[in-house]
Structures are given as C-alpha cells and as structure tokens.
Image (cartoon, rainbow, N blue to C red):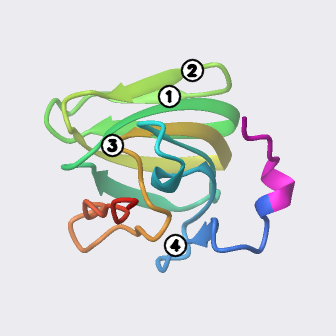
Amino acid sequence: MIVRSFKDIEGTDRHVKAASGTWESKRIVLAKERVGFSLHETILYAGTETSMWYANHIEAVVCVEGEAELTDHESGLTHTITPGTMYLLDGHERHTLRVKQDFRCICVFNPPVTGREDHDENGVYPLLTEPEEV
C-alpha cells in the first residue's frame, strides 16, 4: 500500500514545472509504481494557452477548480471546462486549453508517465519507460 499527499511531493522530482511556464504538475503515482497508470494534480495558469497532443498516451482529466476553454483541433469544437467536468482524450486528440482562471485538475495517464516528461514542440509527451526490475 502506498499513502502520500500532494504536499509530500512539493519541491521533489515529482513536482514538475513546464519549461513553457504555463503549468506545474505534482505526479503522485508514476510508472515506477508499476500499477499501469499515473496520477497527477496539475495547475495551468490563468491567461495561458497550452496546445497538446498525447500521441502516446490516453489522458482523463477532471477539473476541481478554475475554468478553461478546451478546443479539439480535429473537430473545431470548444467546451467550457469547470469544476466537476471531465474530459477524456481517448482518440489522441490534438487540443488546446485556454485558461480563464487558474485551472486545477486531476489527471490520469495510460501508459503511465515516468515524471520526466514535458511537451515537445508538437505538444507531445515522449513515451518514456522505467527500466525492468531484475
């Protein structure tokens, strides 16, 4: 059994701040736990815009605070995301979040991230893995 809090991981290597300066993420469950998913609390900052494309991952997001506008690049549809709203990127959709108020969300990734990922120039997280245990 693992028990930890987001407060426990502040300032550690599990507390990742984007090179772009648009978000930070506390990655409470990672690939090294070997449970098949990773779990994060992510905050995207008000007034920012982040374009993403999880070509290698499925992501589920639940907003717990704030407001953002989510645009699906393929369909052109835009959705307002507020507390209690979930979105699932089950088709590897290219998308953009335009943050109206600091946007705090809980995210689940499959396959799990290692904690070292940041978005590349295409908004993609690389598919990193942990070494096999011997």
Asked which secondary structure carries label 3, the reply is: loop
> How many numbered badges does the structure rendering display?
4
Q: Gap in Å between the C-alphas at discs 2 and 1? A: 9 Å
Q: Along the horizontal axis of the image, is 88 left or right of 2?
A: left
Q: Residue at x 35, y 67 (%)?
A: 119
Q: Gap in Å between the C-alphas at discs 3 and 4? A: 20 Å
Q: Amino acid at mark 2?
A: Thr
Q: Please report whichever mark, 3 or 4, sits nearer to the chain's N-terminal start.
A: 4
Dot 4 surroundings within 10 Å: few (below 14), some, or many (20 or more)? Answer: few
Q: Residue furthest right?
A: 7
Up/down of 111 relative to 16, above or below: above
Q: Are marks 2 and 1 in contact (CB under 8 Å)?
A: yes
Question: Picture coordinates of residue 134 (x, y %)?
Answer: 38, 61
Residue pointed to by mark 4: 18
Q: Amino acid at mark 3?
A: Pro
Q: Please report whichever mark, 3 or 2, sits nearer to the chain's N-terminal start.
A: 2
Residue pointed to by mark 2: 85
Which residues are drawn in magenta?
A: 1-8
Q: Along the horizontal axis of the image, is 65 left or right of 25?
A: right
Q: Choose mark 4 or mark 2, whichever is in front.
A: 4
Q: Residue at x 68, y 44 (%)?
A: 104
Q: Along the horizontal axis of the image, is 3 left or right of 26?
A: right
Q: Are marks 3 and 4 in contact (CB under 8 Å)?
A: no
Residue pointed to by mark 3: 111
Q: Please report whichever mark, 1 or 3, sits nearer to the chain's N-terminal start.
A: 1
Asked which secondary structure carries label 1, the reply is: strand
Residue pointed to by mark 1: 80
